[in-house]
Amino acid sequence: MAAGSGGLSPVEAFALVGVAGVGAQWLAWKFRLPGIVVMLAVGLVLGPLTGIFIPERDIGDLVTPMISLAVAVILFEGGLTLNFKQLADAAPGVRRLVIIGAPLGWLLSSLALAYIAGLSWQSSVVFGGVMIVTGPTVIAPLLRTARLFNRPAQLLQWEGIVNDAVGALVAVIALEVVLVRQQELSAAEAVWTVVSGIAFATLIGFGAAVAIIKAFRESLVPEYMKVPLLFVVVIFAFALSDMVLHESGLLAVTVMGLIIANADLPSYTEIYRFKEQATTLLLSGVFILLAASVNLEMLELLNWRSALFILAVILLVRPATVLTSLAGTPIPWKERLLVAFTGPRGVVLLAISGLFAERLVAEGVQDGAVLQPLAFVLVLTTVILHGFGLKPLAEKLELSSGEKPGLIIAGGSAFATGLATALIKADVKVLVTDPNRAMLRSARDAGVPTYYGDILSEAAEHGVEFITYSTILVASDNDAYNTLVATDLAPEFGRDAIWQISRAKEDRARHSLPSQLGGQGINGGRTLAQYLELLADGWIFRNTRLTEEYTLEDWRKAREGAIPLVTIADGEVRFVGRDEKLEGAPDMRIVSLIPPEVAEQIRRESDEVSKERELAREEAKAVRKGAGSGSQHEDDTRDPADASDDEVLDENGEEPTDDAEVAADENRSESGGSDDSGAYYGGTDQAAQDGSEATPDSGNKKD
């Protein structure tokens, strides 16, 4: 049918695809759902379910080349992420998953297609090759949601990235072999056609990459033209390679991305980030197009054998491939099981299957038509299963940080140590980092986790579990370094998660910076020196939990003059912004700096409680020794079941020992103290119910 007849115009169709794709990703982020699930659902609603957008009708013959070019750019992005320096300790496992896992997965998938799904060997070999792909574009969002630890996350991510290219290559080779056999060429001609096409594609990708590297290094291209030139060369390399061997362009762009990724170009970061954003747009569009193109009548080609095949892939083929590949490696069993039962398929499988299905049917392989609906159901099933199941599985295997909020403080100091101690009391995972080991001494003495090194270094990428932290505070004694760290980490963590203490003289015009540099300012707008001066004057950190009875207004009255710095609510840690109006809620925690006069009052209350506890302890001893009326001697024994509700027994049903406390109260308070190195320790906030404090007093060691 002609483009635009009886439906949307091409311009309207393109606009709808863009809005639907990006809107679906936003909804997925907003409601913490797997993005691909929402995009597929939106595509199905717009396409076969309502008929609002039918790609073949509204766009016509442009659908197939659009998808081909989008897949080429997505595969180039996959190659561009193959920086071998970043493999770290996951390298042995990734090598196994590629060298052993890829061919084994191809074999097992092909056998399952032939003997379970009942397809011909031609379709089985081609689709089996495509099934090596696990979908890096699907894995990345799932990893962010599941908050996996580094090594299992790297295994899944790098397997997806590498096998994305390997699977496409295997599928291209398998398709060419099938097509050559269908053309009844001689063995020599068939081998020459396939080998020459692959060699040409590799040469094209290598040559294009070398040209880009030379042009960028020697400044033959102005900065503003680098990204446009890169896109043009990618499309040119894809088209040129495809002229010699159909679909070999996918191999060419993957090789091109791989070489550029390992060339250590100064412009690599900017190129990758821009292209990553473009890939997000293309990915959205491809998923909407593919889902909207689904013909529900095609699903009738599937039967019970298709359902059995999908179960076999999830429960047998994938686990057997991974566990065999990782056998004999030092990777723990929990991590192997997580990887074995996590294998979502994504856009590459869906797109390539659709393209290859048409080629197979055109060459007389009739059951090739089954590949597209089979791929769609496989993608939908695995994405839903792993999208909602990866996080619970990771938590069950103890390979995820769960919902516990995390904060990295870049810059060691007494301020960082005190803040970290108070946050840890509020059950926040905190890491203090600094390239100067001496600046971490107080944090180490206080038992706060530390990382010695530059937070921007390659070593930090491997040594820090970044995925378990959601917020960054940059608070070193170097303003320029703080701005660099905040600016560099903002694209990865999100600008709303990056906070920075104030710079000296930043309120003056000649020292102010544009808003895109640095992080958000925290409440009070103080520099590190000013915070340290407050601590030296007797200010203390305090962690307070609000309740239905103890509201924000109560806290303000009891803590007059306090400076609220951080709030912890609903599993999220967030700094109070400059001039932000603080709003309280039950169970929200506030970490604040308390002025000296209020701190002194807290200490007096704490001393009184300590005296009461000591008195109760001595009275308990006296009662046990028979010094009081109605006392019980120590040698008396009785059944714990006979004890009244008013008596205090330990968890074994026995009376407390001399060291046990007679009365346990959530509101009890311990005095805080610091050692000579300036580490700050926390107690509990009696008035505020379950708080903690860190005092700057010297001369007191923590028990």
Image (cartoon, rainbow, N blue to C red):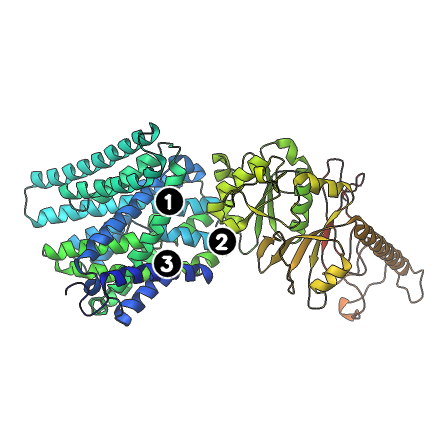
Task: Report the disc number at residue 274.
Answer: 1
Name the spot of residue 672 as percent of width and height, x first: 77, 47
Q: Is residue 327 visible?
A: no
Between label 1 and label 2, give the one nearer the viewer.
1
Could you tell me which quadrant the N terminus lies in?
A: bottom left
Q: Residue at x 50, y 55 (%)?
A: 395
Q: Amino acid at mark 2?
A: Leu
Q: From the viewer's perspective, is 132 left or right of 417?
A: left
| Residue under label 2 | 397
Q: How far across and down, in percent of the image, does residue 483 sit?
A: 55, 39
Please name which of the two marks, 3 or 2, marks the residue nearer to the observer: 3
Q: Residue at the spot x=41%, y=39% of the render?
A: 269
Give the residue drawn at x 14%, y 55%: 360
Give the Cα distance between marks 1 and 2.
Answer: 36 Å
Image coordinates for residue 686, horizontal then vertical, percent:
77, 58
Callout 1–callout 2 Cβ contact below 8 Å: no
Q: Amino acid at mark 1?
A: Phe
Of the numbered discs 3 and 2, the one sitting upstream in the chain is 3
Q: In percent of the image, x 46 and y 46: which residue is there?
A: 491
- Front residue (pair 552, 31): 552
